Image: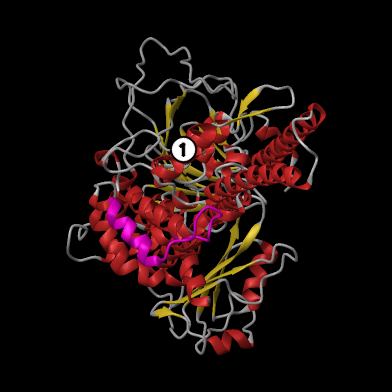
Amino acid sequence: MLLSDAEKFYLAGIEVAGLTSSNTQKIPLVLLTVLSGPDAGLSLTFNKERVRLGRDGANDFVLSDGFVSNMHGEFVFNNPGFEYRDLKSRHGSLVIVNNVSTQLNDRNRIGVVSITDGTELQIGSSIIRFELPESGKTLPPVSSNTANDTNFEIDAVPANEKLITTAHEPVRALTRRFEKQDVRLGLLFRLAEQLNALTRLEDVLSLIVDSTFEAFPSATFFSITLLDTESQELQQNPYLIRLRDGEVTGSNKPILSKSILNRVVATKESILWVRDGMGGDVTQSILEAQITACLCAPLVGQRRLLGVMQVDTRGRGALFSQQDLELFSVLASNAAFAFERAELTDSIVNMFESFVDASVTAIEARDPTTAGHSHRVSAYTLALASVVHDLKEGPFKDIRFSTEQMTELRYGTLLHDFGKITVPVEVLQKATRLPEIHLDVLAQRFETMKALNAKTIWHEFAMKVRNGAAQPDATTMAECQARIDDYDSKLDQTFDYLTQLNHKGFLPDEDIEQVRRVGTMTWTDGNGVQVPVLTPHEIENLTIRKGTLNDAEWEVMKGHSAQSQRFLERIPWGEDLKLIPYLGGAHHEKLDGSGYPLGIGADQLNIQVRMLTIADIFDALTAADRPYRKAATVERAVSILHMEADEAKLDKELVNVFEKHVVPSILHLIPSYQKQHDD
């Protein structure tokens, strides 16, 4: 909106409207305190004729509230008293003087209202108190005359005055005070306070609907209709509809007046429509809906018009007043702010869900044999948590998980292996004790041994023939070939044996000893040097008792838990999700302290991580076949869980609950169970 020349002079600080430099009246000290909103608790004193407030840093009283205009309004000393002036702000100002409210929201002119000590002002989602404190009290520092100075330095104050402070009244106390005189004003303050604490859109909408019906007892219908972000036209169907006596069913869909809604969109102004014609012509939709009176207000966001909020008295003869319209406009302003913030929260949540999903996909893509592990572990853990939550007897009868805790547990279980992103692929995907490339090297060595052995035998035979010690007859040559074949056969048997051990799930002592005996054998290379049949690295890997990782590789793999916690701690989860890094770091710990990476015991392992550990072990046992072992049956996996519980490594009571209540409900998710029944 363009300003007139006079208003431009005024906003530039030129002395107009009776404010002259010849005014010798002493300017009273002004105390401004933010009672609620993003800047709650901010309190400053001023000793000047004009105190301007808004979001722009050039103001005297700077606010961060997104629904406050850059240059929203100002307090002006107009001898002998003060005025508040709304400077054509986008959302207007609600000024409460001696419990009488005045709405200033005219975008065409500056709104002015006289104010007194104790006046309260709502702009955006902030409530500000204006006070003229008495001398003799301690005050916050007087704001510097420099408009954008935010250091709150003390200006020079006459010696006969003292700076005083008065603790601002808490919002709840403020609400109670207003409720004694005007229930609806109290409701307005209470709504602002409650909305600040909500982030979920459904909670925000529920509170707005309840508060609106409470504020307007004659209203029977509530709706929110949103604008299409591309066409900037009202969507065909309302986003939300509520009746005072309950929700709307498909067969009982109320009629909305498009003419009223479109007028609000076109003018971006709140309107009061009553049947006597004040709202314009009566359309067929209004007649069919039996609307007697209607309040409509724009939902104005920080950057765009979000939609229209409406209440009406359909089916009743009750009407609304001008004061109702003012209050409804303020409710709509609060609703728009909360709605936009909740939408932003939902967007952040959706973005984070995508991040979690992408992270899990990236982790599991590095090891195809474990695909689906994180999602299954999450499903198993949440199923166990739901059962524990519902138990009415036993050791877990008092355990309950809130919605926030279940969300925390879901994220924590999905990301529990996040640290595997740092594990080298050759360790993460090591399918056999001795990697295939190393087994190929061993095979080539055995072939070299065969060739050198045959060469040696035939060379010895040739030398004997040359020296006359042997005859080159068929019998003697057959004996040489038999020696070669016997040597080759023994090497082939040894290599086949080592190949079998390389894929075996568990090695007993006799197998380990046999590998070591082979390792003590030597052969003569082409240079005539005696070398061992197996290298120390080959012996180390081929004697791994269980699994495929040697000691060094196992330490690297075990480090993924600590890495999970370290990485997850770098994400600002907030209070509701603070356990996520802990779940990632502790899911391989055991109650008896035998786990890793820290070896902590039962007193440091809460029920959430105990459940995760059970689910993680169960899926590791029942997942798809590994090259070194077959997947365990459900029965075998449960048996192993009980063995661990009997050794005080797992929570015995949780294992019992998992077997009895969870396993039957997750059979369709278990890979080994599916394979068994497919076969």
The residue at the far left in this view is 394
Residue 418 screen position, x and y as percent: 53, 44
Which of the pair 168/637 is nearer the observer? 637
The answer to if 87 sits in the magenta stretch is no
In percent of width and height, residue 622 lies at: 45, 61
Quarter of the image where one finds residue 181: bottom left
* 10 Å crowding of disc 1: few (<14), some (14-19), many (20+): some
Q: Is residue 553 toward the left or the right of residue 662 in the image?
A: right
What span is colored magenta in the figure?
Answer: 622-644
Q: Which residue does the numbered mark 1 point to in the structure image?
A: 558
Q: Amino acid at mark 1?
A: Lys
Residue 184 x, y percent position in the rendering: 37, 60
Asked if one can make out residue 650 in the rendered structure from this viewpoint, the answer is yes
In the image, residue 349 above or below residue 391:
above
Q: Secondary structure at mark 1?
A: helix
| Residue 401 in view in this figure | no
113 with respect to 637 (left or right): right
